[in-house]
Every structure is written in structure tokens, then in C-alpha cells.
Image (tube, rainbow, N blue to C red):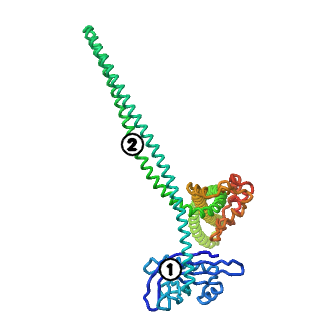
Amino acid sequence: MTELLFNKRLQVLVKSKDTDERRSVIRVSIELQLPSSPVHRKDLVVRLTDDTDLYFLYNLIISEEDFQSLKVQQGLLIDFTSFPQKFIDLLEQCICEQDKENPRFLLQLSSSSSAFDHSPSNLNIVETNAFKHLTHLSLKLLPGSDTDIKKYLASCLSSVKEEKQQLQQKLRKTEEDLTRQLNYAQQTLSEKSRELDKLRSEWTSQTTSLSSRHMQDLTAEREKALETQSRLQQQNEQLRQELESSHHRSTQQLQTKVSELETANRELIDKKYKSDSTIRDLKAKLTSLEEECQRSKQQVLSLRRENSALDSECHEKERLLNQLQTRVAVLEQEIKDKDQLVLRTKEVLEATQQQKNSVEGNAESKQLQISKLESTVKSLSEELIKANGIIKKLQADLKALLGKIKVKNSVTVSQEKILQETSDKLQRQQRELQDTQQRLSLKEEEAAKLKEQLEATVQKLDESREVLKTNENVITWLNKQLNENQLSRKQETVAMFETPAAALRSAAVPHNMVQFNPMSVKPSAAEVSPAAFSQPANKENSEPVGLDSKYFERRDDSIPLRGLLPSMHLNREVPKPLNTAAAKATPSAFFPG
């Protein structure tokens, strides 16, 4: 049993010993021979053929043991199971680069002999860079023997016969469809021609009847007019004016009838033209239907090719759709919770802003008080300097008085009183100085505390801004995820429920099989586990999809948002498709603490 992995035509640079290099188009096919029994192992078959030269055949059979020796010789880093895919990837890169003037990847076929007769050849995949020609892989191919060429030609002939039979069957089906559609078109054309003949006969009969009626009316009116004239001539001249007026009225009525008959005639002519135009339209529709028939044939061919792939993708898309529906419900609930959290953080930010403004006002008032206290301290220092000068003067006076005490005893009592008073004044000034110094130190301590409070409030405000930024980033990320899920959901639903593809799939399914309805499958609440919502994983990259854990860490120095999470849980609405088991996977699991 063989499995075809690759079969395409590539441009190959052919090199031989005594001839020039030339480019030729060679078909490269890669097959994997599957063993019939578990004892045997897989073999990889590489075949080179030329569509113009049927006797050009090179084969290479690589077993697992041969691959191990090839791996050692050429320093390969892959195993036998992944070798075919890597080889096909290199060939695809050669196909992408073959139309360029200086291709980066090139496929070379070189032979040691002068002609490609019965000597082995090397198939090299070479990468050209600025430094050297780097050979990624080199395979030694053997030319096919007569029996191999005969087997190859027999397989080609059998494949051509199968294609011929398939084409003949398709041709028969298309001929039957075309004859059926042609018969239907001829029937419709004959029916339309019959309707046209009926319309023509009705139109001719109506015109003849109307013309006969018109002539009869005219003759009758003429006779009436003659009779009225004979009567009017016999009557008096006084009644002539009245008779003329009545005659004028009758002629006007006749003219209106004539105009009505002319309009009816015109309408019939218009109907005739319309019937002619409908005939032309039917002919145009017939041609368009023929074109649509050809297009539908092409679409049938393409849709038959896509039908098998769509059937396999349908089940996966339905499963993904159900998962995405539950995921979207949870994300919508998370977005509602995040909106409420953002509103709460905005309220806290406004409160902190108001507190900042009030602290700034208090700081300004304290600054004014500090400036006033500094001015009072300056004035007190000046007064102290003056008091020191006065003390010095008083000390000098005291010395003079002590000298005079010996001379004047009578004046001593008064001088002692003056001295006592000056000493009392000095003590009072010293006490006031100490009080002012204590007040100044208290004011300085208050100013330092206010500065520390201002710095703390500014720091808390910066932290609240950072929290708000992280919340906005989380909200934008959730909106992006929700939009991507909705877009993928719309694309999948449009791709699955497209009417031509659905009709073709329903025609291709046998009558004894039950068709699968994607809308009827809904996941139960028991099947949806909370882990599916908390940590959804990407299958291709094996990376968790969701928020980073740093957004949910609790910070000790942050502003406490008391009362937010309980209100969020009270205002939360559970999605309708989920029951209590699914409600446990709500976004409360994402906010620890």
C-alpha cells in the first residue's frame, strides 16, 4: 500500500560531464510505502520522471536503515518520520524561487557520465548565499530498468484510463443536464409563443370590435344630428340658440368618446410592444440561463472537490462554535464586571482628585501661615536685638548707679526700684522670646507634617492612575478578544450555512445517514468546566489565552476599593445558556482577594 506525498513539476538544473548546464522541467514524486504486516518497515520512494520523455526514469528507495546511514553521512538532525515533510518543504522553497533570476534555493541533477543513460545521478538541493553554495541534501538516484519503465508506463496508462473514464462519466452527466435544461427551455419558449399568439388574436379582435362600435356610434350620431337639424329648421328661430348649444355639447361628447377610443388603441399598441419586449427578455434570459448552466457546472466541480474538506471541517467548526458561544457569554459577563469596576475606580479617582485639591488648598493656607510666622519671628528677633542693646545700656547705667550709691544713699532706693523694674522687663522679654521660639518650632513641625501628607496623597494619586491605566488596558484587551471571537463566529457561521454548499452537501449525503445540525448541539452546563474558562489554551502555540497574572495581584500599598466586588457580584447577571455549574466559572475566579 502506497501513499502519495508529493507530485509536482519543478525546474531542475541538469549537469553532465561533457555537456553544458541546462534547465529542464522534471516531475518529482514522493511516495511512502506502508507495510502490509507489522514486521516490515516503511520505505520512502523518490521518483524523477519527464512528461515529454517517457523513458526518463530515476528511482530511489530509502528504508529506515538507509536513512540512518544517510543521516550520519550528511549530518541530518531529523528522524525518518519527519524526513519526508522536511524534504517536501525544501522542494516547495525551490518551487517558490524557480521563477526568479537568481533563485536562492535550486534543485540540481548531476551525472558523472556524459549523458543520462544508465549511470546513477545525484539530486542536490542547494541554497545560494553571499558566501558559498550550501548543499542541504544530496540523494543518489538510480536509473530505472526496463521492467521499472514498463511498470511506470503501465501505471501511467492505467491512471490515464481512469481519468478518461471519469471525464466520460462527467461528460455524460453534463450532456444529460444540458439536454434536460434545453428541453425545459424549449417548453417554456413554446408556452411563451402560445401566450404571444393569444395576445395578438385578442388584440386584433378588440381592435375590430372597437372600430365597428365606433363606426356604428358615428352613423347613429350622424342620423341623430340630421334629425335634430330637420327639427330645428321646422322650429322657431327663438329656439335656435338652445339647439345649437345642445348640438355643441353632443359634438364635444363625441370628441371625448373618440379620444377615449384612441387612448384605448394606444394602450393596445403599448401592450403589443411590451409583449415584444418580453419575448426579447425571455431570449436574453435563455442565453443567461445557458451561461449560468456552464457556471453552475464549474461550481459543481469545485464544490465536489471542496465537499469532502468541508464535511470534515464542519464538525470541528461546530465544536469550536459551541466553545466560542460559551466563551463569549463568559467574556460578556466579564466585560460587564470590568465596566462596573472601571466606574468604581473612576469614582475613587474623582474622590482622590477632590482630596488632592483640598490638600493643595490646605498646603497653600499653611504656607501663608508659615510666611506670617517667619515675619513675626523676624520682628521678634529685631525686638530681641533692641532688648539686648537696652540691657547693655541698663548694665552700664547700673554700674554708674553702683558708683553713685556710695555718694548718694537717698537715691539708692529709687535706683533699686528702677533696677528691679528693668530686670522684670528683661525676664518678661526672655519669656516672650522662649514662647515665640516654641511656637516657631511647632509651626515648622506642622509644615513638615503637611508636606509629608501632600507627598503621600500625590503618591496615592499616581498609584490610582496606574491602576486605572491597567484597568483600561484590561478593558481594551477584553474588547479585542470579544471582537475577534465575534468575527470568527460570524465567518464560521457564514461559511457553514452558505446555501449552495449546504444544498450540495445535502445532495451528497446518502438517504440512510443522519445529517448533523450544528445549531441543535448545545453544550450542557455539566460539560463546561470552570477550567475551560479560567485558562483557555491555544492548540497551535500551546500558550494560555487570557490576562496576565500581574493584573490580578493584590498590592498592599494600593488604595483599598472596599464595597466594589460585593456590588459587582450583586449586579452580575448569569448567562442564559449556562446553569449553576457554569456560573461558577464567572469572572470572580479571575480576581483573587
The quarter of the rendered structure image containing the C terminus is: bottom right
Residue for badge 1: 54
Q: Residue at left 40%, top 35%?
A: 201
Q: Secondary structure at mark 2?
A: helix
Tell me which corner region of the image, top left, top right, bottom left or bottom right, holds residue 443.
bottom right
Label 1 environment density (alpha carbons within 10 Å; few <14, some 14–19, many ≥20): few
Is residue 465 visible in the rendered structure shown here? no
**In this rendering, the label closer to the viewer, 2 or 1:** 1
Residue for badge 2: 276
Q: Position of residue 231 (x, y in %)?
A: 28, 11
Tell whether 34 sits left or right of 109: right
Tell me which corner region of the image, top left, top right, bottom left or bottom right, holds residue 245.
top left
Q: Residue at left 44%, top 84%?
A: 22
Q: Position of residue 435 (x, y in %)?
A: 65, 64
* Amino acid at pointer 2: Asp
Relative height, residue 90 to residue 264 (above, below): below
* Amino acid at pointer 1: Leu
The mark that comes first in sequence, 2 or 1, is 1
